[in-house]
Image (cartoon, rainbow, N blue to C red):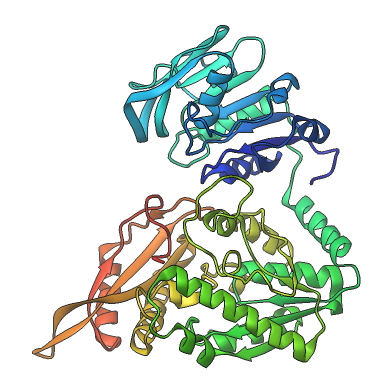
Amino acid sequence: MADDKIDKIIVLDFGSQYSHLICRRIREMNVYCELLPYNTPAKVINDIKPKGIIFSGGPASIYSSDSPIPDGQIFGLGVPILGICYGHQLIVDKFGGKVKRASYREYGSAELFIDDTSDLFDKVGSKIRCWMSHADAAEVLPEGFRTLAHTQNSPSAAVVKTGMNIYGIQFHPEVVHTENGLEILKNFSHKISKARPDWRMECFVEEAIHNIRLKVRNERVLCAVSGGIDSTTVAILLHKAIGSNLSCVFVNHGLLREDEQHQVPKLFKDHFDIDVIYVDAEEVFLTNLKGVSDPEMKRKIIGSEFANSFLKVALKNGPFQWLAQGTLYPDIIESGVSKGPASVIKTHHNVGGLPKDLNFKIIEPLRNLYKDEVRIVAKLLGVPAVLLNRHPFPGPGLAVRIIGEITPKKLKIAKHASRIVEQELLRVGLYDNVWQAYAAVGDDRAVGVLGDERMYGHIVIIRVVDSTDAMTANWTRLPHDLLTDISNRITNEVEGVSWVTYAVSSKPPATIEPQ
């Protein structure tokens, strides 16, 4: 929890995959925001003294018998409320309106016509493109409510209860696809809720170090590092908080980027004066993954083997009471273990992949942050550009970029082709302008011609995306000449490849990694 002197907005999570993204957007505007379960008692919320409350979206229908409902006393706290999507329908239903299955469902972009440009839609404009994701709609508004905006299929796409500062909107202002969505959230947090914009990431750094010391005390922590920005930032926070009570471990699982096993320990020693325990577990990981094609099973095996590696290090170098990890909120929400009723998208090795009987207490200082926030924290901590600007790399490594069984041939292709993609982006100065870039490979093959001879080789998939927080992403429109150069290099330099394709799916509906 943030300092009591800092104004706060609370988001109640009703199961939307973007619940925490609302928090992220509010914090982006320098107002502290926290996500809580939808059924948090009104007394607990009142003790927090929020300036405003937001109801998230969610997959349920308000007229279903098992639909999630908040504590009714929340509406009597006198705090401004904004309901988004399911939250909007919940408010309409709560006050006696009628919600029913829409005649025309709205998914994706829609044109929103603003009928009232005061308060919530101040400085937004008379018409915007908004992002819809619903099959239900408000058919009859409750008494005392009026319409603020509408779409072709939603006559009450935004409403307000006169005199009570209770608002409902059918669309999602938190996603980048809604024009001026941040302005709408800013109007609610700053203008309607009157929350002061006094939250800074410097506050997070101070609070994180304080909380680590408070939680760990004189006990010892083992921190798993991968060379990525997340685990690096955790290691530095811990180092500042507990000093010599921290030990870092780097596990080479054989699924790393080219030469990473040599680079990471050296970077930690050279830049942070932190010695890293190196574990060569390549043979164990790859042996246990042999013959496994199911992506969830691969993630579970990797999580289990990571835990085994940590336990072996603890026996030799311990005792350690804590295991620290660079878990972020997108990892948690995709793994389906967030505070709300969100569904599982894919298990992350450091969230759902770890065995339940692990004999460590887990500490995850970044679990409520998004990647762009972590980069800000890392910069504040003095992380050098060579690490700060590296593209995200998944903990399970190339296991999630090799579709189907992991074989030595496919592993070699994924490593070499990914290095070519990064090299070409660096050559033309685009590496720092994209979020993530890599090459994936599966079992699909295609006929090619090499030196006038027929070959039946693998198809390599190039994936390059733009994002700010990893919750949504757009495929990057790379210059055609660059794509040509990447394709030519891969087919010429990577043995066993006949075709190169470019992935043009955004998130959603796709994920950033293929598995």
- Position in image of residue 514 (x %, y %): 39, 65
Residue 125, visible in the rendered structure: yes
Would residue 363 appear left or right of 111 to someone viewing this image? right
The answer to which image quadrant residue 369 occupies is bottom right
Q: Position of residue 231 (x, y in %)?
A: 65, 70
Question: Count the marks: how many?
Answer: 0
Give the farthest residue toward the right. Answer: 218
Q: Is residue 47 above or below residue 75?
A: below
Where's the C terminus, which quadrant? bottom left
Q: Quadrant of residue 271?
A: bottom right
**Outermost residue, left side:** 452
Looking at the picture, tell me which residue is in the foreground, 127 or 317: 317
Vertical comparison of 202 with 142: above or below: below
Q: Is residue 394 left or right of 25 when viewed as pictured?
A: left
Outermost residue to the front: 65
User: Which one is in front, 389 or 91?
Assistant: 91
Looking at the image, residue 461 sits to the left or right of residue 277; the answer is left
Residue 375 lies in quadrant: bottom right
Where does the image place residue 380, in percent across and percent down from the top left? Answer: 73, 61
Q: Nearer the viewer, residue 320 or 64?
A: 64
Residue 355 in the image, given as x and y percentages of width and height: 62, 72
Position of residue 143 relative to residue 78, above or below, is: above
Whether residue 418 is situated above or below residue 371 in the rendered picture: below
Residue at point 40%, 16% (across, down): 155
Residue 276 visible in the displayed image? no
Q: Residue at x 55, y 13 (%)?
A: 96
